Amino acid sequence: MAVDFSQEIKDLRATMDSVREVTDLARLETQIADLENQAGAPDLWDDQEKAQAVTSSLSRAKAEYDRVTGMDSRIDDLEVLVEMGEEARETGEDEHEVFAEAAKELESLKKAVGELEVRTLLSGEYDERDAVITIRAGAGGVDAADFAEMLMRMYLRWAERHGYPTKVMDTSYAEEAGLKSATFEVNAPYAFGNLSVEGGTHRLVRISPFDNQGRRQTSFAAVEVIPLIESTDSIEIPENEIKVDVFRSSGPGGQSVNTTDSAVRMTHIPTGIVVSMQNEKSQIQNRAAALRVLQSRLLLQKKAEEAAAKKELAGDIKASWGDQMRSYVLHPYQMVKDLRTEYEVGNTSGVFDGDLDGFIEAGIRWRRGQEKAEEGA
């Protein structure tokens, strides 16, 4: 079936019109100019924290601007390529190679423009932030601990595919295999907005490699995603509300990683929230990292409580996403299925190797649909 390039290009331009409207390029240009002025100040690096914030914001704003304007250029180039193919056909030359190249670029553009369109749906207060992900093994014994480690690798591979830096902050290994829990950062624009749809309970069904009778085992792991706190966020925690314990860092199988008591366990007494950090080199660094994650969790909890209060006042209390949000089935058939969006794929090894974009995009669109339904109600 021949590709209707004219209609496809028209559709791409229409989508980009809505992307530009939401992105507000004029606002971005003003923001970039302002940040460039700040970055050019001779005393910028007198305050290193502020300097890093300015240069990071400038880099992100420029990347966002180039991402949108660069897409328009690619659509223009595709249109020229299609015109070259049509001219070749009219002059009796072989146009097939040109149209094959155009079809390949069209598919690449549709994917890229689709990703940009999804980005416009990320308008939450903290969607632009870096993300902190915590994975905890649930029911299922050693299989659950192994599943937790599989999920951690899956998200780290997803970040690697996109060129996003990651930083493992804490790992608590299970005795036989896998992880009891792990916490890591994904440092990229909109990391929280994208990965927030991954929060919830994940379920694995497979023949257990740890069962000598080869029985099928169902195990669970919980994924928590929070935005990384920034210095401008107003979350102050009184010292008397925090309990800090120090202990020795350890690796797999109880192997010593550090010979000093540098690991930190921080407990927020009023809420019972516990954060552990052991991957930094010193107790001071681990304490600072733990405090930042604790502040992030309290900030998100505060916003969730405010949102719940607003819904209660409106007389509209809806249940949250529910316990199970995704199933990974490796036996008796191969399938990964999101239970909210109904999005599913049969390539389970690809998913565990970080191919998550389809699930994330479907989750973001689903969430936006839920928000619109609530607004309408």
Image (cartoon, helix red, strand yellow):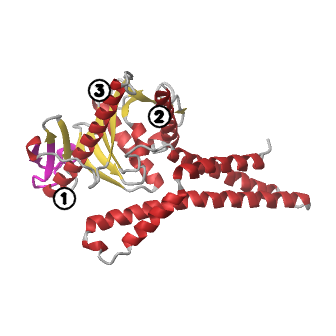
Q: Magenta residues, as a range?
A: 242-266
- Amino acid type of the residue tagged 2 in the rendering: Arg
Q: x, y (%) of residue 312?
A: 33, 24
Name the N-terminal-most of marks 2 and 1: 1
For the residues bearing labels 3 and 2, Cβ distance under 8 angstroms: no
Q: Quadrant where the N terminus lies?
A: top right
Residue 251 belongs to magenta span: yes
* Number of the front mark, 2 or 1: 2
Inter-mark Cα distance, 1 to 3: 33 Å
Q: Is residue 172 visible?
A: yes
Q: Which of marks 1 and 3 is nearer the N terminus?
A: 3
- As rendered, which of 75 and 213 lies closer to the eye? 75
Location of residue 205 in the rendering, given as x and y in whole percent from the top left corner: 41, 27
The residue where tag 1 is placed is: 281
**What is the crowding at mark 3: few (fewer than 14 residues within 10 Å), some, or many (at least 20)?**
some
Amino acid type for the residue under numbered disc 3? Ala
> Relative to the observer, which residue lies in front, 100 or 199?
199
* Quadrant of the rendered image containing residue 66: bottom right
Q: Name the residue under label 2.
A: 367
Eye-nearest disc, 3 or 2:
2
Tell me where residue 19 appears, x and y as whole percent.
57, 49
**CA gap, disc 2 and disc 1:** 39 Å
- Helix, strand or loop for disc 1: loop
Q: Which is nearer the eye, 308 or 102?
A: 308
Q: Badge 2 local density, few (<14 within 10 Å), some, or many (20+)?
A: some
Residue appearing at x 29%, y 30% in the figure: 138
Q: Where is residue 124 in the image (x, y as percent from the top left)?
A: 41, 43
